[in-house]
Every structure is written in structure tokens, then in C-alpha cells.
Image (spheres, grey):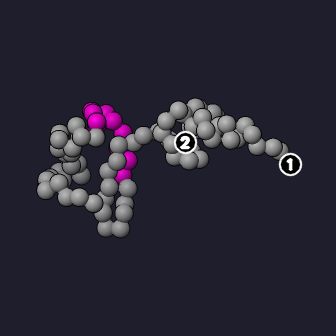
Amino acid sequence: MKSTGIIRRMDELGRVVIPIEIRNQFNIVEKDPIEIYVDGSSIVLKKFEPNCIFCGNTKDLLTYNDKLICKNCSQKIGKLKQN
């Protein structure tokens, strides 16, 4: 992980402002969903991107029964034979 040298204080409601330079770098705009991860003793914020439930791909997604599946996985499922 690379340090930005930017330090922000958390307010009384637990909020932290992400600096505009970082939001611009990651194309994060108002109301964008952000995922929160814990990695050891670190908290990681990541812009949420919908992805395939099987492979994690974020491109060429199809919706099936309210689940996202990429075209590649969809084609593989279509080729499966039932026993």
C-alpha cells in the first residue's frame, strides 16, 4: 500500500472525507457506493463495481434471477450437460 500523506479526522458521526484528488483519481462522485474491507489492521475503501458472481469480471454482465453473470460464464453454463 502506498501512503498519500493525507490525514483526515473522523467526525462525531464516524465520517471521514475522501479528498477530491483521490475521488477524481478513482472517478468517485457523489452517491457512488463504496465497499469497505478489512485487511489485517488496515481499513480499505474501494469504489463498488458490480461483478460476475462466478469469476468477478466487471464487463459484459447479464442479469439472471437478480444475479449478475458475465457473458463468458453464461456461455460456459450453457455448455454444461446434466447427468
Q: Earlier in the sequence, mark 1 or mark 2?
A: 2
Q: Secondary structure at mark 2?
A: loop
Tell me which amino acid carries mark 1: Asn
The N terminus is located in which quarter? Answer: bottom left
Name the side, left or right, on which 67 lies relative to 17.
right
Which residue is at a point 56% across and 47% down the rendered structure image? 55
Q: Is residue 53 magenta?
A: no
Label 2 amino acid? Cys
Q: Secondary structure at mark 1?
A: loop
Residue 67 seen in the figure:
no
At label 1, counting other C-alpha atoms closer than 10 Å, the crowd grade (few under 14, some 14-19, many 20 or more) is: few
**Most frequent secondary structure within the magenta stretch:** loop
- Residue named by callout 1: 83
Vertical placement of residue 1 versus 67, above or below: below
**What's the residue at 17%, 41% (across, down)?**
21
Decide whether residue 34 is among the magenta residues. yes
* Residue bounds of the magenta highlight: 27-36
Find residue 61 and report its horizontal and vertical position in percent: 54, 33
Residue that sits furthest to the right in the current view:
83
Residue under the image location 42 percent in, 40 percent down = 49
- Residue under numbered circle 2: 52
Residue 40 spot, x, y in % from top left: 35, 68
